[in-house]
Image: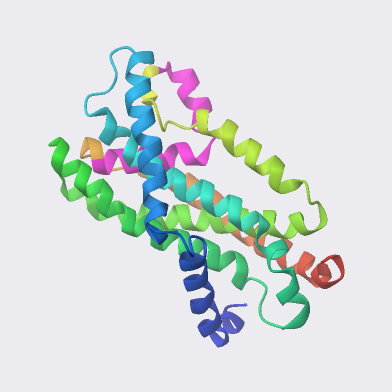
C-alpha cells in the first residue's frame, strides 16, 4: 500500500489541495471559513457557559479555543472522511488509483488546517497573558497520535458507508453526543475520580487534555495515557487498513 501511495503521490497532493480549496470555492472568505467557524463557536460558548458553569476557568475563552480547534479537526475529518468514497463514486468507477488516497487526503487536509489554526491558539495565548512554555515541544507527538487515530477511524467508516448508507448519519449523531463526553467546554477537575476514569475511555479526552496541558497549564502531557491512546490508535489503523482493503474490492459494484 505504501509503495502504491508513493507512486500516486502527485494524485494525493492534488487531492489534498482540492479538499482544502474546493470546500469553500466561490465564497468570499474561502479557506478562512475553516477558522471562522470554530472561532464563532468559541465565542458563543465563551459568552454562554461562564453563566452556566459557576466559577468558570480563568481565561475561559483561551481555555476552550485550545480544545475547540483540535475537536473541529476531529469532527470535520470524520464527517467528511466517512462520506468521501461515496462522494467520489463516479471517479472510482472510471479511473484506477489506490482507494486509500481518498480518506488519507481528507485527514491530511484536516491536519494542514489544524497546523495553521495553531497560529490562532498562539494569538489567544499571547493576548490572554497565558503565554508559552517549553512543553510545546510535545505538540508534534500529540498531533501525530490524533492523526493516526483519525486515519484508523475513517478507513473503517468510509468503507462501511459504501454498503450501509445510513452510517454517516449515525456517525454525525454519535459525534454530537461524544462532544459532551469530551472535556472541550469543561475541566476534568470538575468531576470525581470515578467519572474522570470513565471519560478517559474516550481517546479524545486524553488528546484534548494533552493539548490543554502543553498550551494552557504549561505542563508535560500524561505520557502513560498518551501511550495507551497511541497503541489503541495503531491497532485501529491496522484494522482500518484491513477492513478498507477488503471492502474496497466491491466498491465499483456498490457505487
Q: Position of residue 133 (x, y in %)?
A: 16, 46
Q: Residue at x 56, y 87 (%)?
A: 7
In the displayed structure, 76 sits above or below 159; it is above
Indicate yes or no whether the magenta region holds residue 206: yes
In the displayed structure, 133 sits above or below 60; it is below
Q: Quadrant of residue 15?
A: bottom right
Q: Position of residue 120 (x, y in %)?
A: 27, 49
Q: Residue furthest bottom?
A: 7
Q: Which quadrant of the rendered structure holds the N terminus?
A: bottom right
Q: Position of residue 175 (x, y in %)?
A: 59, 39
Q: Residue furthest top?
A: 54
Would residue 24 be found to the left or right of residue 186 on screen?
Answer: right
Nearer the observer, 229 or 146:
146
In the displayed structure, 61 sits above or below 163; it is above
Q: Which quadrant of the rendered structure holds the C terminus?
A: bottom right
Indicate yes or no whether the magenta region holds residue 220: no
Nearer the observer, 100 or 198:
100
Q: Position of residue 252 (x, y in %)?
A: 82, 72
Magenta extent: 191-215
Our reading of the magenta stretch's main secondary structure is: helix
Is residue 181 in sight in this rendering? no
Q: Residue at x 80, y 68 (%)?
A: 251
Q: Residue at x 61, y 83 (%)?
A: 4
Nearer the observer, 52 or 1:
52
Counting every numbered tag in the picture gives: 0
Would residue 115 be found to the left or right of residue 160 on screen?
Answer: left
Amino acid at each position: 500500500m505504501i509503495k502504491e501511495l508513493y507512486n500516486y503521490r502527485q494524485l494525493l497532493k492534488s487531492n489534498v489541495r482540492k479538499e482544502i480549496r474546493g470546500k469553500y470555492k466561490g465564497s468570499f472568505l474561502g479557506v478562512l471559513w475553516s477558522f471562522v467557524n470554530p472561532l464563532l463557536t468559541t465565542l458563543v460558548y465563551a459568552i454562554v457557559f461562564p453563566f452556566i458553569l459557576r466559577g468558570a476557568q480563568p481565561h475561559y475563552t483561551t481555555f476552550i479555543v485550545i480544545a475547540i480547534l483540535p475537536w473541529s479537526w476531529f469532527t470535520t475529518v470524520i464527517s467528511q472522511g466517512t462520506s468521501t468514497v461515496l462522494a467520489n463514486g463516479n471517479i472510482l468507477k472510471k479511473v484506477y488509483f489506490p482507494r486509500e488516497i481518498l480518506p488519507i487526503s481528507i485527514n491530511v487536509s484536516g491536519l494542514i488546517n489544524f497546523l495553521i489554526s495553531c497560529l490562532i491558539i498562539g494569538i489567544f495565548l499571547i493576548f490572554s497573558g497565558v503565554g508559552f512554555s517549553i512543553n510545546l515541544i510535545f505538540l508534534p507527538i500529540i498531533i501525530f497520535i490524533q492523526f493516526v487515530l483519525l486515519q484508523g477511524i475513517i478507513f473503517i467508516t468510509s468503507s462501511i458507508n459504501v454498503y450501509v448508507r445510513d452510517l454517516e448519519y449515525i456517525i454525525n449523531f454519535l459525534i454530537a453526543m461524544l462532544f459532551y463526553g469530551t472535556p472541550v467546554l469543561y475541566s476534568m477537575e470538575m468531576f470525581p475520580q470515578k467519572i474522570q476514569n470513565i471519560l478517559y475511555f474516550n481517546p479524545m479526552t486524553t488528546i484534548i487534555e494533552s493539548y490543554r496541558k502543553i498550551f494552557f497549564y504549561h505542563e508535560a502531557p500524561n505520557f502513560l495515557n498518551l501511550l495507551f491512546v497511541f497503541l489503541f490508535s495503531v491497532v485501529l489503523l491496522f484494522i482500518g487498513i484491513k477492513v478498507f482493503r477488503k471492502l474496497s474490492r466491491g466498491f465499483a459494484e456498490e457505487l
